[in-house]
Image (tube, rainbow, N blue to C red):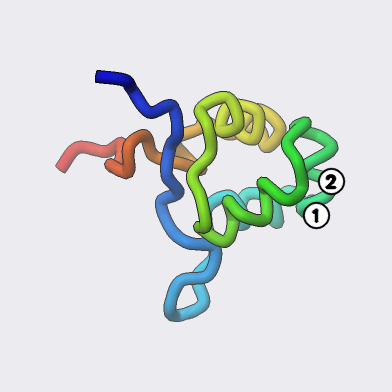
Amino acid sequence: MPVDDRVTTKHKATVPGGHSSPLAICRRSRGLSQRQLAAKSGIRHETICRLEAGLRGPRWTTAQALARALEVPESVLFTVGGHGGGAS
């Protein structure tokens, strides 16, 4: 059975109540625009927009590049297979 190499966002960019996605929060906390993050990570601006909007989950290599650019672990931004990384 093939393994899907995409991960899913923990939250949509703006969920009911106005909360932002972890990716958007980390990006903003570092004072970066989406275009600046795109340049720093090598990921297309359009892809970052879709990820922050919760329209798609990134490939694992995309998650790694974004986490590296933001200097955070991938688990802060995304979860693998839609499951949280913490113990229940």
Where is residue 32 drawn, in percent x and y?
79, 51
* Residue for point 19% across, 37% down: 87
* Residue nearest the viewer, comparing 22 with 6: 6
* Residue for point 54% across, 63% down: 13
> Secondary structure under badge 1?
loop
Residue 15 position (above or below residue 71): below
Please say if the residues under marks 1 and 2 sit with CB atoms less than 8 Å apart.
yes
The quarter of the image holding the N terminus is top left
In the image, is 51 to the left or to the right of 34? Answer: left
Disc 2 marks which residue?
36
* Residue nearest the viewer, comparing 58 with 31: 58
Q: Which mark is residue 33?
A: 1
* Residue for point 57% across, 61% down: 53
Q: Which mark is residue 75?
A: none
- Cα–Cα gap, marks 1 and 2: 5 Å
Dot 1: within a 10 Å radius of its alpha carbon, few (fewer than 14), some, or many (20 or more) residues?
Answer: few
The quarter of the image holding the C terminus is top left
Residue 33 position (above or below residue 62): below
